Image (cartoon, rainbow, N blue to C red):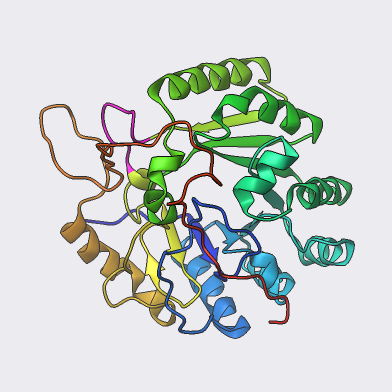
Amino acid sequence: MTAPRPYALLAEITYRCPLHCPYCSNPTQARDNGELSTDEWTRVIREAAALGVLQIGFSGGEPLARRDLPDLVRAAREANLYTNLITSGIGLDDDRMGALRDAGLDSVQLSFQSDNSDLADEIAGTRAHQHKLSAAAKVRAAGIPLSLNFVIHRRNIDRLPEMIELAETLHAERVELANVQFYGWAFLNRATLLPTRQQVIRAREIATAAKARLAGKVDIFYVLPDYYESRPKPCLAGWGQRYLTVNPIGDVLPCLTASSAIPDLHAGAMPELSAKRNRFWRMSLPGRVADGKRREHRPGLRVVPKSRSRGRDLEQSESIKRPSIRLDLSH
């Protein structure tokens, strides 16, 4: 088969982060093999552009933990890539905002845990909400388009109207309402995070109404929950077909949720990607939704756990597990 080219690269440039969210996308057992250097990331960016990638998202962990972030943004712009910073906002002061703007940053996606400061800080595991509000103001003052991301779960899903209102107040151009995806840390904490079916149905109604009300003003993107869908959705339109991830140690992944790299493919061998992806897809089956007659396993399939705790908040749950990789601005 002939592989379609990927058009987006998620560059997870570090696992370091100041937050300790129970649904963290960092691996639960990250390998401490050392982060790619500035030169190595620059090479990855150039080779990704040569493959046909059109946009890059700088993520983590917290990408602001890397002091060379402006250099990486500049390298991406020189490669004619659209650049997006996916951040908690912690560490985004005036100087860093100016440096990123001058490097050519195109957009910022800022994460929020809730509209309510106390609840947001509880979920994040640290006092972060006020820093996020300040970061949003700095992004807007710099004239850079702002997107907000809310990860939705049992503890905050009933505040969806207030979260949408916060997005309006902060003049966000795009809002991603992302039902928590149960892999990694979120899977470990699924008994605490999983909302009820009634909560999910109500949230979809609220998101649909807000999308219609704010059409032409705020673009609202609602990420479907896996656990309450009749069929699994494709994982990022099929593993590796449109999106690629390179993690901090240089593994090339077909999607950010993959537990292992494309076989034998490291960031140092990006030019070999097309042939290796073809072989990988033949082994792993791209994630297309089943047609109702065939029942094949596809990436993105989730199974509802047999038992769930109910009515416990995050701090009352003895089983809650949090990532502990700390932010270090010295690197």
Q: In the picture provided, is 207 more to the left or to the right than 299? A: right
Name the residue rendered at 70%, 50% in the picture.
Answer: 107
190 and 56: which is toward the camera:
190
- Residue 6 in view: no
Q: Quadrant of residue 227?
A: top left
Of the 4 image quadrants, the one containing the N terminus is bottom left
Q: Relative to 26, does residue 189 appear above or below in the rendering? A: above
Q: Position of residue 189 (x, y in %)?
A: 42, 49
Name the residue rendered at 51%, 75% in the picture.
Answer: 44
Q: In the picture provided, is 281 more to the left or to the right than 12? A: left
Of the 4 image quadrants, the one containing the C terminus is bottom right
- Residue 90 in view: yes
Q: Quadrant of residue 290?
A: top left
Name the residue rendered at 32%, 41% in the picture.
Answer: 234
Q: Position of residue 102 (x, y in %)?
A: 83, 64
Q: What range is drawn magenta here?
A: 226-234
Q: Is residue 194 magenta?
A: no
Q: Is residue 231 magenta?
A: yes
22 and 252: which is toward the camera:
22
